[in-house]
Structure formats: C-alpha cells, structure tokens
Image: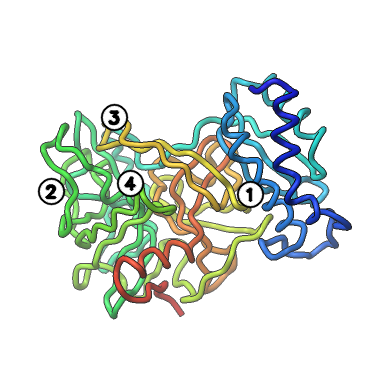
Amino acid sequence: MPPIPTLCCLLRNALSTVVILFAGLSWAGPAGIVLDRTHPSVRAAIALQEKITPEILKWPDVLGTAVGVNQAGQPDLVVYVEANARSRADMIQATLLQFLNIPVRTELTDKFTAYKGPHGDDDDSNVSHKASQKPPIPLGTSGGWRSDLANGYCCGGTLGSLIQVNGAQYILSNYHVFESDIVSGGNNLIATNGSPIIQPALIDIRCNVHRARNVGTLVKLSSLPGSNVDVSIAQVDPGMVRTNGAILAIGTLSSHTVEAHLNQEVKKSGRTTGLTRSHVSGLNATLSVHYENECAGGVAFTKTFTGQIVIANGGGAFLGSGDSGALMVEDVDSSPRAVGLLFAGNSTSAAANPIDEVLQFVSGKMGGVAAMVGD
C-alpha cells in the first residue's frame, strides 16, 4: 500500500475536481427514496468513486469498489478487500475516512469468479433446475455448450432467458457458459458458430452428451475480453424452448427492463441454487474477474468490468457456481422486469451486467434491436 504522504496527494488530486458535487448534499434521504444513479447523493458518490478507484486498485489485496448503502440509508464507498487481509482493510478504511466526505467501508471477501458450473460430474438430477426439461423447455435451467468437456472434467451453466432480435428468438446466457473454449488443448475443439447448445448441461448428466437435447445453436458474439459485458446467445431450435420466454419458478417476464437501485429486491432462477432472492448492495462496481480458456483449463485473461451491479450473496445463498447466465429480475409476483445478467460472484457478493447494456451490445452485434421476450 502506498505510504500515507503519497496517498494523501493521490486523494487530494482525485477530490479536487469533484468536491463541488458534495456541497450542501444531505446523505441520508427520507424513507422510500429510490437510490438509483439519478439520485444526487448517488451521483456524487459515483463521481468520487470513479476518480479514486484507479489508484485504489493499485493497492495490495484490493479486489474492487462500488457505491453501496450503509445501515443509516446513506450512499457509501465500498472497497472489496481480500478476506485474509483484515489489518490492511482496517488501514484502508481509516485512511480513506481522513480524506473523503462520504461514508466509507471495506468488505472482506474473496476473488470474484466467473460462475460457470463446477468441474466434475455432478448428477443431482432430482433437482428440477438441473433436470432434463420436457420440450418446449422453460429457461432458468441447466445448459451449455455441447462439447464443454476437457482435461477430464465437464462444465456448464444456466440457460437464462429469452430475447428477440430481427424476428428470431435467442437463449441469453454468458460468454463463459457458451463460447469460452478458445483453445483446442483439452478436447481438440473450440466453440464455433453453429455449435449445439444443450439442456441439461454436461455436469448434470455425468458428462454423457447422449443424455442431453440440443435446444439451440451458438451465435458467437465474442463479447470478451473486448467489451464490458459477459454475454452469449443461441438461436432457438424450432419447438425446443417456450416461445413466451417463461423462466422456471418465475414465469413469464415483462418485455420492459428496469435500472438497478440500492436495496432493490431481486430474484433469479438458476441451475445450481434454483429460485433465490436478495437485494442490490452496490452500483457502478469496478471488479476484476479471471476467465479460463476451456473447461478446467488455464487462465485465458483477466477482465476488469466497470459499472456493474453488486448483489448481497452471503454464503453463496443467492448465486452459486453454475448459476452463471441466469437473469436477475425485480422481485414482484407477476411479469417482473429484467435488471441484470448474472455472471460472477464470491462468498459475499454476486455481480451482474446491467441488462440494458447487455441488450445494447447484442443489438450492435446482430444489426437489430434486441429485446426481452415477455408481456
């Protein structure tokens, strides 16, 4: 960590262009106020966060930052720190509090991981989200690339939701679920356009592809490492997916989307943990995530994402390994709006790409407007 004199200069320089935003702000808002990116206190916190995050990320054991909300209902700066570095976390918090006019806290956690299915031959087929579904299948269920087997292991994730582009329907999931096999090392194959996408994933059928059904064909978007979203799609095979986009245990969605806000109640349906609920704990997060080059392979690259949504995930109760690709929606009884595309997590937090950014990226790649299928 930089010595205190150096740190003082860094923080003063970062603060000099944003301090005017904080003049006269009341950090604790009335009950019922929506703390989204348009709220003045949240905007001010984000402006400060974006100024100082590049320097904070240079410090040892720092994993990322976000704008969160504390127990008093105030937007605060959250710094994610390696779980085994408690003394450093205390030092970071004390140092930042000397120079910032907003609440600051550190969260001890572990590295954010792309939550593709566990390497192995998990065959918990009595769980409906992992089981073979009768066509036309609901989404929010186990699935992945048909050849996702390498180095003695098989992998998979979640077939998250249904979108429509140029009159055709596509399964929405993650890059690292559908197309991250980019070397031929462990299976002499790489993911290519037209590769079959199956349900359930190989990890739920003892790696035996003959027990799965083809439900779509891969459309490679190559979203990573170049873009700020972890997304891939598969064009639906005729008759194999419910055309209304119904998600297991959630039902049909709204065709509209909604922006995340702090403390927003959300839910998702995924391959590993099924239907789970939580709340948004951070906005505008900057997080680094490691990606493999194939199932149980080596590190292909490390991607630093910005502007991400963070969700409380204590003990992995909301998002687990294999839930990647699941769609996060608002927690309402009927026709929920999509909030984000889940892709990574750790033992305390989960991460999602904002859904509007995901759809915008797909639209640009496909040459047409991408939209959620729903009411």
Which element type, helix, strand or loop, lies under badge 4? helix
290 up-or-down from 18: above or below: above
The quarter of the picture where residue 349 lies is: top right
Above or below, comparing residue 371 to residue 153 in the picture: below
Left or right, residue 50 beside residue 101 = left
- Give the label on residue 176, or none: 4
**Element class at badge 3:** loop
- Residue matched to label 3: 298
- Disc 1 target residue: 282
Name the N-terminal-most of marks 4 and 3: 4
Q: Residue at x 68, y 56 (%)?
A: 262
Q: CA distance from mark 1 to mark 4?
A: 23 Å
Q: Earlier in the sequence, mark 2 or mark 3?
A: 2
Q: CA distance from mark 2 to mark 3?
A: 27 Å
Amino acid type shown at disc 2: His
Give the number of the mark in front: 4 or 2: 4
| CB-based contact (under 8 Å), mark 1 and mark 4 | no
Is residue 231 positioned above or below 99 on the image? Answer: below
Type of amino acid under label 1: Gly
Q: Give 45 or 240, whichever is nearer the viewer.
A: 45
Locate residue 148 relative to residue 89 in the image: left or right.
left
Percent x, y of residue 75? 75, 51
Q: Amino acid at mark 4?
A: His
Task: Please name the amino acid that badge 3 sits on.
Answer: Gly
User: Who is closer to the viewer here, 306 or 82?
Assistant: 306
Q: Position of residue 123 (x, y in %)?
A: 29, 39
